[in-house]
Amino acid sequence: MAKAKRKYVCQQCGTIATRWQGQCEDCGEWNSLLEEAPETVFSAKHDLQTGGRALQLVGLDADIPLPPRASTGIAEFDRALGGGLVPGSATLIGGDPGIGKSTLLLQAAARIAARGPGVIYISGEEAADQVRLRARRLGLGESPVQLASATSVRDILTTLGDGPPPALLVIDSIQTVHSDQIEGAPGTVSQVRASAQELIRYAKLRGTALVLVGHVTKDGSIAGPRVLEHMVDTVLSFEGERSHQYRILRAIKNRFGGTDEIGVFAMVAEGLEEVSNPSALFLTHRDESVTGATVFPALEGTRPVLIEIQALTVRLASGATPRRAVVGWDSGRLSMILAVLESRCGLSFSTCEVYLNIAGGYRVSDPAADLAVAAALISALSERPVPADVVLFGEVALSGEIRPVAHAPLRLREAAKLGFDRAFVPGSIADGVPGIAISGFRTLAQLVDQMLGRG
């Protein structure tokens, strides 16, 4: 019998190596290769064109009803899910430790169980008494949620097979669960993949909505094999800074709805509260105009959110190296905006320290924020405030041109609803909305002339 070959699997990216080495060649992570027992492979020559089960083929025009959805009782959670939980679906939710994943799921489980459907909460990290104490602290001590503390997939599936399938099954977390058919410690690539596959198979066969909690790595991505995100139907990311009270539940993948939808929550003593108007959370209330502050209507999925962008410039002595500090935005994009302002608009930031901050700890990746950032920098440098009733959005090109962005009417309607009277937008946007006047700019130099009173 041939000697079994050793294989080493990276616990971060799943790469397989034939020998151990200190650093993974694909992802660059150190000390992430662990030895795993090879699978037994039987080689036999046979014809795969016969002996199988014939499949039933259907056309694209077949009448298929939309999947039913079950509301979690939390409107912001339902929004991120695309309308609610789908029976038989698998949802993966990840986030930093202590961000509130278990609290959110416990609240949702209690509200679903209060309506009658069975709910089972399996914790692999805490004892059942610990979960029960948290439920009492959240005011959910009388909820009919069934609790258990287990890490064996065999024990979990055996317990579920003894009774009717629950409407909701929560596994907290998938990295703590293991299968006795796979060698390796819980949390390894093979264990996470095999455990998730068995749980998802049960959910599909019995029509149970499955929610898996996933750990995250130091860079914020979900730990374990990347195939885990491909196996589930929905991937949610719970974001936020523990120093701030707000939390954002963002949909990254959704087979039953749109992506990039968000739900906004605020962490209070009684748990997580919904924020129905997130724009009020990220806007600073100011009675007079302030230099270096602009308002940008960001778009998260189908929801516009008004946020405040703050900039500060500090003149340095000759010969000192200026500093660039950014919180909540891409530092590379800030360098690009500064270069366009210097090259195309004649402004000099070479002797200034530049600080940029997104108020409330919010993180912006929308390129439409370019114009609002540029206006904040111009205002901070010239010490001329942008009027408090103005919102700005538009993408800035390296040529200094201001490009149009998607869903401009939706952004304008949200600004008008919150009391803003004017908007500085790309010049190609001709149609406005009632209640807000628009001023179009084709180049960034035109905006500079407007703010500095030149020409």
Image (spheres, rainbow, N blue to C red):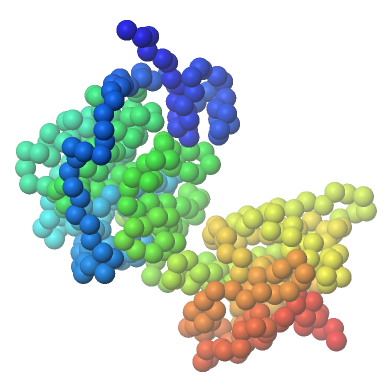
Residue 37 point in image, percent of width and height: 36, 18
Residue 198 point in image, percent of width and height: 23, 37
Residue at image position (12%, 40%) is: 160
| 301 vs 43: above or below | below
Residue in front for this viewpoint, 116 or 265:
116
Q: Quadrant of the N terminus?
A: top left
Q: Quadrant of the C terminus?
A: bottom right
Locate residue 286 relative to residue 173 in the image: left or right. right
Locate residue 357 relative to residue 41 in the image: left or right. right
Residue in front for this viewpoint, 94 or 98:
94
Residue at image position (57%, 25%) is: 23
Q: Report the residue that reaches farthest toward the right.
A: 318
Residue in front for this viewpoint, 119 or 285:
119
Residue at image position (57%, 89%) is: 431
Residue 368 point in image, percent of width and height: 61, 69
Residue at image position (54%, 69%) is: 298
Residue 115: image quadrant is bottom left
Residue 192 point in image, percent of width and height: 34, 34
| 189 vs 56: above or below | above
Q: Report the residue that reaches farthest toward the bottom.
A: 434
Locate residue 407 relative to residue 213 in the image: left or right. right
Examine the rendering and report whether any part of residue 237 can be seen: yes
Count of residue discs? 0
| 415 vs 167: above or below | below
| 206 vs 69: above or below | above
Examine the rendering and report whether any part of residue 269 can be seen: no
